[in-house]
Amino acid sequence: MRGRLSFASRRANDEAVNRSPTQLRARRAAAPKPRLDASLPIYEKRDEIVRAIRDHRVVVVCGETGSGKSTQLPLLCLEAGRGLDGFIGHTQPRRIAARTIAQRLADELAVPLGREVGFKVRFADKTAPSTYIKVMTDGVLLAEMQRDRQLRQYDTIIIDEAHERSLNIDFLLGCFRRLLDRRPELRVIITSATIDPQRFSEHFGGAPIIEVSGRTYPVEVLYRAPGATAAGTFADTSQPIIEAVAECAEHGEGDVLVFLPGEREIREASKALHASSVPVIREAEVLPLYARLSAREQLRAFQPHDRRRILLATNIAETSVTVPGVHFVVDTGVARISRYSSRSRVQGLEVEPISQASANQRAGRCGRVADGVCIRLYSEDDFAERPAYTDPEILRSNLAGVVLRMKALKLGEPRGFPFLDAPSPRRIRDAYDTLIELGALDAAHELTAIGRELAAVPIDPRLGRMVLAAAEEG
């Protein structure tokens, strides 16, 4: 979640903050002229969104899958006159989304990636002082706050996919709630699927909500429960996946996106598909898609191809990115969910049934370019019994990293921080206990030298302490 800024990145940030009046005039004169995609639903709200950005410090844009929020909002910010006094920051929850959206924006502005439009993810910074739109992961923005607490290099921030309610997103929303009092000229735009946008509006004192329709085609949902597997669990679904993919092929041409809970399950399913004797499967190209793949391997899923593809993905493909050519989805109904146990004080990553909202997001992946079919490998009764939404990560996570970051940024105590959902006192006590045990805080809850080092390491504090100890031991 945190990390050191590279020399090149610090230089670009410093130049962005310390531009002279002459440089600012030149920047305004050289600003790219946005050309919006009139075929996207968000285009119909173009004037309303531009007015809202000019008139309000915070705007909530709520839209369904395919509305064009992620790619068109930065261009609408340019149209509203933003990006002239600083970057338009555009955060994404995942690296693959940051890269692909940055490339799409550069293509739409007809400029090379890394100049007027750039991106920054961990270990890769393709931005310059001439950049107007900077797409990045939300973790990168949090890391930058350690050096630039008021984010002076930005005049606009877009928090995309806020409905995911990750720790990073909730922490950023709390930071912006405070920061806006010190930077009234800053504009914050929050985008969300149609999942309780009123919460975001209320958090910022009644910010306007602009609803945008989605551009989706009809999706037929079919239920094919494997039978012996208990509701909401994951067993060996290789054969049901093979049968579901074969059934998809009966509906026509198009790629198949299969959602699986993790890398191990993806490898097992890939092995089974390669060994299958079903002709349509043997003729297809099987590709994995998960977070730990290299950027080159991830981008293979977005490249043009001649034959049917079967994409085996984690929930990395659930939101943010649109994989072209997908007409069918096979949903195993489960994902690996990070959850903290107060009793054992251990953060686990267990396979759990997904929420109805996540299932609907998955189904929407195959209705972007044509009519689609989604086959769920569980029963309709199972779906009806699932929770409507996934719990926010802050309510199911160890907060040691959050408390450590707050101490490093001098943001005060967690109990007084404007979280969207306040964590329980017990979770906060556990976080302090953990940090004291690690030597990151002293008995007075003040940051120690070890704590300052841990705050600069972009991993869980307990793992970070092991890394520091290993370095000490040589």
Image (spheres, grey):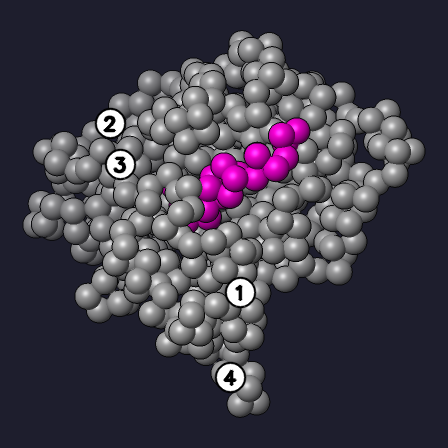
Which residues fall within the magenta stretch? Answer: 165-186
User: Quick check: is 167 in the magenta stretch?
Assistant: yes
Q: Earlier in the sequence, mark 2 or mark 3?
A: 2
Marks 1 and 3 close (CB-CB < 8 Å): no
Answer with the quarter of the image where residue 430 lies. bottom left
Q: Residues within 10 Å of mark 4 (few under 14, many from 20)?
A: few
Q: Horizontally, is 229 left or right of 129 in the view?
A: left
Q: Earlier in the sequence, mark 4 or mark 1?
A: 1
Magenta segment, prevailing SS (helix, strand or loop): helix
- Contact (CB < 8 A) between labels 1 and 2? no
Amino acid, disc 3: Tyr
Closer mark to the observer between disc 1 and disc 2: 1
How many angstroms separate mark 1 from mark 2 (CA)? Answer: 46 Å
Q: Residues within 10 Å of mark 2 (few under 14, many from 20)?
A: some
Tag of residue 470 = 4
**Which residue in the structure is indicated by mark 2?**
221
C-alpha span from label 2 to label 3? 19 Å
Mark 3 lies on residue? 389
Q: Closer to the camera: disc 4 or disc 2?
A: 4
Q: Secondary structure at mark 1?
A: helix
State yes or no: residue 30 in magenta.
no
- Answer with mark 1 or mark 3, whichever residue precedes in sequence: 3
Which amino acid, mark 2?
A: Val
Q: State whether residue 448 appears in this view.
A: yes
Picture layout, residue 68 above or below residue 425? above
Task: Return the x and y of residue 155 as percentages of the image width and height.
Answer: 68, 33
Q: How far across and down, in percent of the image, does residue 174 sit?
A: 46, 42
Which residue matches tag 1?
Answer: 455
Residue at screen point 56% across, 75% down: 449
In this rendering, position of residue 222 left or right of residue 155: left
